[in-house]
Image (spheres, rainbow, N blue to C red):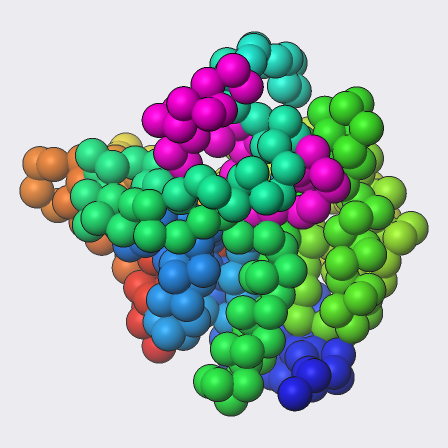
Amino acid sequence: MHLTRRAFAASTAALAASPAMAKTTPKPIVIAHRGASGERPEHTLMGYRLAIDQGADFIEPDLVVTKDGHLVVRHENEIAGTTDVATRPEFAARRATKLIDGEEVEGWFVEDFTLAELKTLGARERLPELRPGSAAFDGREAVPTFQEVIDLAKAQSRRAGRTIGVYPEMKHPTFLASVGLPIEARLARMLRINDLDAADAAVFVQCFEPGPLATFKTLSKARRVQLVGAGSPAMVSAEGLKSIAAYADGLGPDWSMVLPTVDGALGPPSALVNDAHAAGLLVHPWTVRAENRFLPPKLRRGTSPAEHGDAEAVFRALYAAGVDGVFSDFPGLAVAARG
Ligand code: G3P
Ligand code: CA
């Protein structure tokens, strides 16, 4: 059965929320960051399935482009850290050093592989020491295409009887354009052919680079979210937020920009959620992870960086601060804390 855009469009107030609606929306959305990536290798279909089973509202694929122009799901265009490419003698000669976004990177790059070649690789856990349970699933699945993730979201929406949205991120757009593989129009086309080119579709398109996001606005009606790192205070000034609101529907800040750490504990929320809402922007902070390594010192439990600390405190504080959604490697915990 073909699922129409209307059927796939947000079925809850939270999924379709405008900033004004967000104030009356009972539930912030839970975005499964690269899947249930605390428990399965990131960006795998099994990781997305687990996230949906745990109650995630959206699944997040980071996107890059193959040599033959297909959108595939990886966090970086360099894939030694998340696939078995380095163990494959037939691809040894593809090892290269490139300048990516101002940084010299050595390894194997998606844009040097056709989709058929990429599909022969096995996906792997990025942090095996921290996440050995996830690493047990290494090699079980291939790198998914964006189309496969959309198909999964549609099929799981039917199965679960609720709308599962997709939250794609354009990775390295300036670099990809420089090698003749621009990502913006490819993504817009994929949304169009899947009946997702609409402001009320269960889709958010995200990017750290403002230019490509503004370009994307001219190509698609799907909603857009400007990602912001903790080192970019100018972007979240009143002027910066006003300028983002000209081309984006939401802001995706590092969660520490909403909840600063004070004396090793969670401090009071910053003004960012209120300021962004005042500018007409939704707020979806990233990325809450349960392991001690990623938590403020006073929320850690036990001594190992891999042990889980009190991530629930982070979720609760973010929800109390009024966020409209949250990215997490542990979507099940985010859903549980939402209550
Ligand atoms: O997209 C939100 C968050 O994922 C941004 O960081 O590096 O995990 O893609 P990253
Ligand atoms: Ca991302």
**Rendered image quadrant of residue 283:** bottom right
Coordinates of residue 175 in the picture (x, y in percent): 72, 25
Q: Is residue 91 magenta?
A: yes
Q: Is residue 117 magenta?
A: no
Task: From this view, report whether residue 187 is shown above or below residue 79.
Answer: below
Coordinates of residue 77 in the picture (x, y in percent): 58, 31
Farthest residue, direction front: 90
Foreground of the two, 28 or 121: 121
Foreground of the two, 116 or 237: 116
Farthest residue, direction right: 218
Coordinates of residue 202 in the picture (x, y in percent): 66, 71
Task: From this view, report whether residue 323 is shown above or below residue 230.
Answer: below
Position of 321 compared to 5: left or right? left
Q: Residue at x 52, y 15 (%)?
A: 93
Position of 218 compared to 131: left or right? right
Q: Residue at x 50, y 77 (%)?
A: 156
**Rendered image quadrant of residue 294:** top left
Magenta stretch in the rendered image: 65-94
Foreground of the two, 46 or 334: 46
